Image (tube, grey):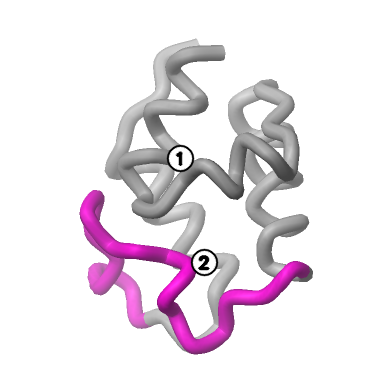
Amino acid sequence: MEVILEDLIEKLEAEFDEIKPGSLKANTSFKDLEEWSSMQALVVIALVDEHYEVALSGEDLMQCETVQDIYNKIIEK
């Protein structure tokens, strides 16, 4: 399955209630977002699994700082 960065960004924006569409960028440090929490981390892991059939671990996500990093992890797996 081809993973497109812009598609991932749109899906992530939809999962964050306080994020306006179009405001997330590849270099956004998602952990600095006001609503980032351990619950959001689980949501991101579930989103990646559901839409891209890639199992990210909590450790994988902890190694990521930006949206680009999440994308790169998906591509690696």
Is residue 48 rendered magenta in the image? no
Name the image quarter holding the C terminus: top right
Name the residue type under label 2: Ala
On the image, the x and y values in percent for residue 72 come to: 38, 27
Horizontal side of 38 relative to 24 (left or right) equals right
Report which residue position mark 1 lands on: 70
On the image, the x and y values in percent for residue 66 come to: 35, 52
Q: Residue at x 52, y 42 (%)?
A: 63
Q: Which mark is residue 25?
A: none
Decide: is 62 above or below 20: above
Report which residue position mark 2 lands on: 14
Decide: is 37 above or below 68: below
On the image, the x and y values in percent for residue 45 come to: 70, 45
The part of the chain drawn in magenta is 20-38
Q: Main secondary structure of the magenta part?
A: loop
Q: Nearer the viewer, residue 13 or 63?
A: 63
How many C-alpha atoms fall within 10 Å of the one at disc 1: few (<14), some, or many (≥20)?
many
Name the residue type under label 1: Ile
Q: Residue at x 33, y 72 (%)?
A: 21
Which marked residue is nearer to the observer: mark 2 or mark 1?
1
Decide: is 70 above or below 67: above
Is residue 24 rendered magenta in the image? yes
